[in-house]
Image (cartoon, rainbow, N blue to C red):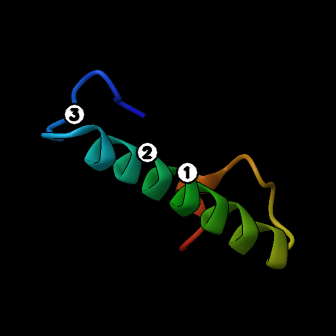
Amino acid sequence: FLVIRNYAKITNGLFARIIGKISALTILQYVNFINDKPIGRIKYALN
């Protein structure tokens, strides 16, 4: 997730970035699940 390299000024910004990344990952996994593709291949979810 590259949490070490963050540019958040406050902790709320850091938490917002982490939650955004986790939710984006979950959405891509769900798109793969709907299209009967392997869930772990999120890189190819939008192809």
Indicate the amino acid at tag 3. Asn
Residue 38 horizontal/vertical position (percent): 81, 55
Indicate the amino acid at tag 2. Ile
Callout 1: few (<14), some (14-19), or many (20+) C-alpha neighbours within 10 Å? Answer: few
Q: Which residue is mark 3?
A: 6
How far apart in space, not on screen, are marks 1 and 2 (Cα)?
6 Å
Disc 1 is placed on an element classified as helix
Q: Which residue is mark 2?
A: 18
- Looking at the rendering, in which quadrant would you find the C terminus? bottom right
Q: Which mark is residue 22?
A: 1
Q: Is residue 1 left or right of residue 8?
A: right
Callout 3: few (<14), some (14-19), or many (20+) C-alpha neighbours within 10 Å? Answer: few
Q: Is residue 2 left or right of residue 40?
A: left
Sequence order check: which comes first, mark 2 or mark 3?
3
How far apart in space, not on screen, are marks 2 and 3 (Cα)?
10 Å
Sequence order check: which comes first, mark 3 or mark 1?
3
Tell me the residue at 67%/50% (across/down).
41
Disc 3 is placed on an element classified as loop
